[in-house]
Image (tube, grey):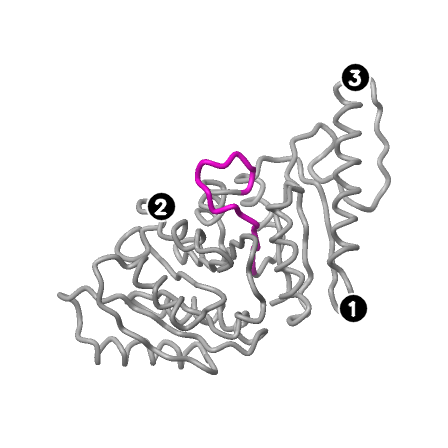
Amino acid sequence: MKKILVPTDLSPIAEMGVKLAAEIAKRSGAIVSLVNFTRHPFGKSFTATGDINLKIDEEGNLYTLQLLQANKAKLDALTQQYGGPGIQFEYSIVDDELKDGIDSYLQQEKIDLIVMGTSGEESAQEAFTGNHTEQVIGVSTCPVLSVRDGFVIDNFENMVVAVDVIHGNQVSSGLNTLKHLADCFDAHVHLVHVRDRASDSPPVLDEYFKSMAEAAGLKHYFVTVLEGDDPAEAVIGFARDVKAGLIAVIKNSKDGIFRIFSNHFSDRLVKEVGRPVFTYNLQNA
């Protein structure tokens, strides 16, 4: 894991993403890239370094420049607060809306993980909550880790991964990405599949997920096949039982357990206080 993107609107909610990204960077050596997406007329990227040579001939431009300078100061303060030995930050202000800006930024930069602060409330008005998290998951070519206030780093020693049977080697590919995060915390990974009673038998499923875990190189893993009418509740209940600090969802379609956009599976998981959700949309990979 070499580079982590943290989109931020500089709110206390978004700061949760900075806090968690710094913890991951401390263990992985990754660079944390803080990006504030704000529309402005001064070029695509308003960065922390470089000369700013602007002609301020309109009152609106002057106000915007002052806003950007204030945002730069806040970004710098965040790097000072969460930086430290072995934690490297970079930051910039990008002239774009969140969804389009994320898409373009991922094409330009080699990002391994996006970390976003969220309130977990669909009705909230903050820039980085609810539907905005789903929008980023919808376009992101890398995993998205959404986090709300109250997470406990010590609990990351247990991670629960909701998995489904996916043709080919996609499950292994998704788990390989999660492995880098699990290695940072020397975590035990619980692969959890919620079985439809009409689907394959538990022994067959158990063998399938074990083969995927081995192919991904997971060090400490367990496979659990559950039965339940409500997949989200089954996964949440299991996560409570093992005191998991993080829940992961690996998906490649809108079907089955991974209907993130139709039944808000990830939203329900995020609303569990203190439990970040790692979502990898393999359709975009």
> The residue tagged with tag 2: helix, strand or loop?
helix
**Which range is magenta?**
113-128
Three-letter amino acid code at disc 3? Glu
Q: Residue at x 69, y 37 (%)?
A: 44
Near mark 2 (Cα within 10 A), the count class, few <14, some 14-19 or many ≥20, is: some
As rendered, which of 161 and 111 lies closer to the eye? 161
Residue 122 painted magenta: yes
Residue 267: image location, x then y, percent = 41, 49
Q: Which residue is mark 3?
A: 59
Q: Residue at x 43, y 66 (%)?
A: 174
Q: Which mark is residue 85?
A: 1
> What is the quadrant of residue 115 in the picture?
bottom right
Residue at the disc numbered 2: 261
The answer to which of marks 1 and 3 sits earlier in the sequence is: 3
Specify the label residue 221 is tagged with.
none
Identify the mark nearer the N-term, 3 or 2: 3
Quarter of the figure that contains the N terminus: bottom right
Looking at the image, the residue that sits furthest to the top is: 58
Q: Is residue 118 magenta?
A: yes
Please, is residue 42 above or below residue 35 in the view? Answer: above
